[in-house]
Structure formats: structure tokens, C-alpha cells
Amino acid sequence: MTDNLRVMRIEEVMKRTGLARASIYKYALNQTFPQQVQLGRGGAVGWLEQEINAWVQEQIDRSRGKTANT
């Protein structure tokens, strides 16, 4: 495992993305948002920070008309 893996809980994901809880879960169901990671058996979940950061960057690029090839 690498040292740069960090798991974020829902509250931090909401702050980082600006999305509401319901939107995060809706986008995850539609597979247009990073998938959550199960944290143990108690139902707790989190998201990998690097995947959330990449998703945010994609949204920025898309809103500014940039593509992966530019």
C-alpha cells in the first residue's frame, strides 16, 4: 500500500465537492462518481481522496471546455 492513500468520510467529500449527500450517492449509483470503499463490517464507508480530487479536476476541466487530449 502506498503512503498517499487517504480515505475521506462523507462530510469531507461533501465539502471538497460542494455536493449534497443525496447527490453523491445518486452519482455513485449512476457510476458517474468514484465508488465508495467499505470500512469494516459496521456499514461505514469512505472515498479515496485521490479519486475525489481527480473527479473534481474532471469537473473543472469539463466546465472550462478542456478535454483529456488538450
Image (cartoon, helix red, strand yellow):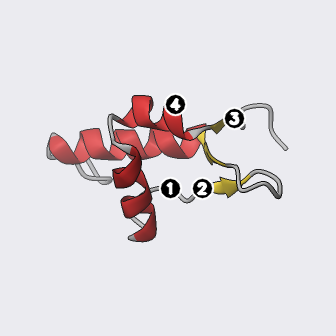
Callout 1 crowding tier (Cα within 10 Å): few <14, some 14–19, many ≥20: many
Q: Indicate which disc, 4 or 2, sits on the residue closer to the N terminus.
A: 4
Q: What residue type is labelled 1?
A: Pro
- The residue identified by callout 4 is 12
Quadrant containing the N terminus is top right
Q: Which amino acid does label 3 sit on?
A: Arg
In percent of the image, x 33 and y 41: which residue is there?
A: 19
Callout 2 crowding tier (Cα within 10 Å): few <14, some 14–19, many ≥20: some
Label 2, secondary structure: give it: loop
Q: Which amino acid does label 2 sit on?
A: Gln
Please give the label number shown on residue 34.
1
Give the residue furthest to the bottom. 30
Q: Which of 25 and 54 is in front in this view?
A: 25
- The residue identified by callout 3 is 6
Label 3, secondary structure: give it: loop
Determine the CA span between mark 3 and mark 2: 13 Å
Left or right, residue 27 beside residue 66: right
- The residue identified by callout 2 is 36
Q: Nearer the viewer, residue 53 or 23?
A: 23
Determine the CA span between mark 2 and mark 1: 7 Å
Determine the CA span between mark 3 and mark 1: 14 Å
Give how far across and how far down residue 24 sits, in percent. 41, 52
Q: Are marks 1 and 4 in contact (CB under 8 Å)?
A: no
